[in-house]
Image: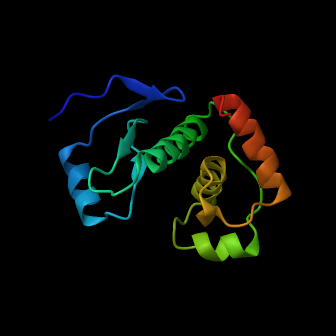
Amino acid sequence: VMPDWDTAVYGVGVRDVHPGEDKYFKDNPHVAGMAAEDNKIILNPYSKLSEKEKQAVMMNEAARVHMRQGMIDAPRYDLSPEQGKAFANYSKSIEDQRQTIAARILSGDPSALQPTPDQLEYVGKLRQFMGVK
């Protein structure tokens, strides 16, 4: 097992994957990374992302950790009807859906779909909190 990276992205640690996570990533190469249960960022070693794309994934996952830990108030906005359909199978939890959309808007991921004014307002606060330019 590789030692944890001595790095942090937007105040959140990044570490190498553990064996169970490695199997998950190997079986799910479309998943670029995640905020692990220990609130560290892990990246899929089997992903073919560019360095720039990896940076966006790490920003996204760092935002998830900050929201999950309550370091910034969790988003409370409504999803657009399109987002509701698109994220219905992502998670049964509306909180997960809201956090995912906020993190994706922040990192410029188009899969967040068209953000609402409330979502953009929240992401503005998140961007400021994290010091994202």
Q: Residue furthest left?
A: 1
Q: How many marks?
A: 0
In the image, taking residue 83 as reference, residue 2 lies left or right, namely left
Q: Is residue 49 left or right of residue 75?
A: left
Residue 132 in the figure: left or right of residue 33: right
Q: Quadrant of the C terminus?
A: top right
Q: Where does the N terminus fall, quadrant-wise?
A: top left
Would you identify the image quadrant in which residue 123 lies? top right
Single out the residue that lies furthest toward the top: 6
In the rendered view, how is the structure colored?
rainbow
Position of 12 relative to 82 (above/below): above
Relative to 16, say whether 10 is above or below.
Answer: above
Q: Give the residue furthest to the right.
A: 117
Q: Residue at x 77, y 61 (%)?
A: 78
> Residue placed at 62% from the left, 34% from the top?
70
Q: Is residue 93 above or below residue 42?
A: below
Q: Residue at x 63, y 53 (%)?
A: 108
Q: Position of residue 120 (x, y in %)?
A: 78, 51
Point out residue 82 in the picture as x, y percentages from the top left corner.
70, 75
Q: Nearer the viewer, residue 11 or 107?
A: 107
Residue 30 rendering spot, x and y as whole percentages = 37, 65
Residue at point 66%, 28% (across, down):
131
Residue 38 image offset from top left, x and y in percent: 38, 36
